Image (cartoon, rainbow, N blue to C red):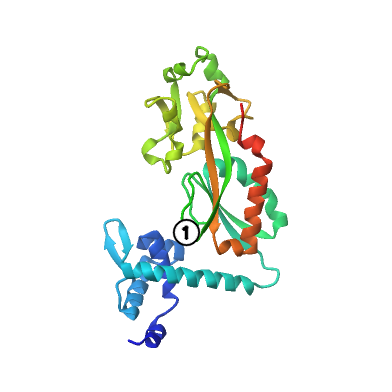
């Protein structure tokens, strides 16, 4: 088939099904993103492969994987997608509000960023989808237009920068501390019950800060979310490592060993290289960066 005939035989709409399956690896996940059925996704992929006379995916026990040819097409399909999105922004109806998806880990999302974004939205002219989850979102998979993660993002078309360092400390309720002997030395920490993450459900190694205290602690309450861990600490269950921006100004909690026990982690912010050229994404990005810079005293404690 000639190049012109192949181009005419290709339904460009099928490229969106190709991109979704390439990014999500499973028919069900791709269908959910596209608001279609998994049968439709599978059919459109087969039609595309037939039109191009190539195999784009192989099905494995872990889902659909791109073939070498499929990987080559992915690069060009993403270029088409980027150019289309830029073109659509240019013809947006006057007065229409842009929508930006912001993905952030639930600790920072629920306990710091959500209320600040919400206060900014009314005057911004931008609608926000705020995705706050106990996992990382990525801009490369199109889960978000702007993503804030604990690990440095990677990707060929990704703009990234360090958003902020933040500190964590060991906290407990006043009731818990009143029921136990005073903690004066770091070595005493292993004698207490602990609150923390479920180790095999962690989405990043950056959350394994308990290992900096001891390889084995007595965990009496574990959860996939930092919010649940804070609630357990408030209930007097045990000691918990919490971000200072969550716990330092909570009157029902007290910090333990303030002079020599502190953990430092980092948040990274990222967006797609071309999405960063969208005015709404650009303004949302700069609002987050500027606000975080103003709030360094809250996020990073020297105590």
- The residue at 32%/67% (across/down) is 68
Q: Quadrant of residue 34?
A: bottom left
Q: Which residue is mark 1?
A: 140
Nearer to us in this view, 164 or 15: 164
| Vertical position of residue 169 compared to residue 224: above or below | above
For image coordinates 69% across by 42% down, the residue present is: 294
Query: What secondary structure is found at the residue carrying circle 1?
Result: loop
Residue drawn at (45%, 37%), measured in percent from left and top? 207
- Looking at the picture, how far across and down is residue 53, in whole percent? 30, 79
Identify which residue, 60 or 162, lies in the foreground. Answer: 162
Q: Is residue 104 visible?
A: yes
- Which residue lies most toward the top here? 181
Whether residue 289 is situated above or below residue 41 in the rendered picture = above
Report x, y in % for residue 181. 50, 12
Counting every numbered tag in the picture gives: 1
Q: Quadrant location of the N terminus?
A: bottom left
Q: Is residue 95 above or below residue 24?
A: below
* Residue density around tag 1, few if under 14, some if 14–19, many if 20 or more, within 10 Å: many
Q: Residue furthest right?
A: 123
Q: Position of residue 220 (x, y in %)?
A: 41, 26
Near-viewer residue (191 or 257): 257
Figure quadrant of residue 125: bottom right
- Residue 117: in sight, yes or no? no
Q: Quarter of the image containing the C terminus?
A: top right
Q: Position of residue 279 (x, y in %)?
A: 65, 63
Identify which residue is drawn at 37% across, 73% down: 44
Q: Is residue 249 left or right of residue 264?
A: right
């Amino acid at each position: 088939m000639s190049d012109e005939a192949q181009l005419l035989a290709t339904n460009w709409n099928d490229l969106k099904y190709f991109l979704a399956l390439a990014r999500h690896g499973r028919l069900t996940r791709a269908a959910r993103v596209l608001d279609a059925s998994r049968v439709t996704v599978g059919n459109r992929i087969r039609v595309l492969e037939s039109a191009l006379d190539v195999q784009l995916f192989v099905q494995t026990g872990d889902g659909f994987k791109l073939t070498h040819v499929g990987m080559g097409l992915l690069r060009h399909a993403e270029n088409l997608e980027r150019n289309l999105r830029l073109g659509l922004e240019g013809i947006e109806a006057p007065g229409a509000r842009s929508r930006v998806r912001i993905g952030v880990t639930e600790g920072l999302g629920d306990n710091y960023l959500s209320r600040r974004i919400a206060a900014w939205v009314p005057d911004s002219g931008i609608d926000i989808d705020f995705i706050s989850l106990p996992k990382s979102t990525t801009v490369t998979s199109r889960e978000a237009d702007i993503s804030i993660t604990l690990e440095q993002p990677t990707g060929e078309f990704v703009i990234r920068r360090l958003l902020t360092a933040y500190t964590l400390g060991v906290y407990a309720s006043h009731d818990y501390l009143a029921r136990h002997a005073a903690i004066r030395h770091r070595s005493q920490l292993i004698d207490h019950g602990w609150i923390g993450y479920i180790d095999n459900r962690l989405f990043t190694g950056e959350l394994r800060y308990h290992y900096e205290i001891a390889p084995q602690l007595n965990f009496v309450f574990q959860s996939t979310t930092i919010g649940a861990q804070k609630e357990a600490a408030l209930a007097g269950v045990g000691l918990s490592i919490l971000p200072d921006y969550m716990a330092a100004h909570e009157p029902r909690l007290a910090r333990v060993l303030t002079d020599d026990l502190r953990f430092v982690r980092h948040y990274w912010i990222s967006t797609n290289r071309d999405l960063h050229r969208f005015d709404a994404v650009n303004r949302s990005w700069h609002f987050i960066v500027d606000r975080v810079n103003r709030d360094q005293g809250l996020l990073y404690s020297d105590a």
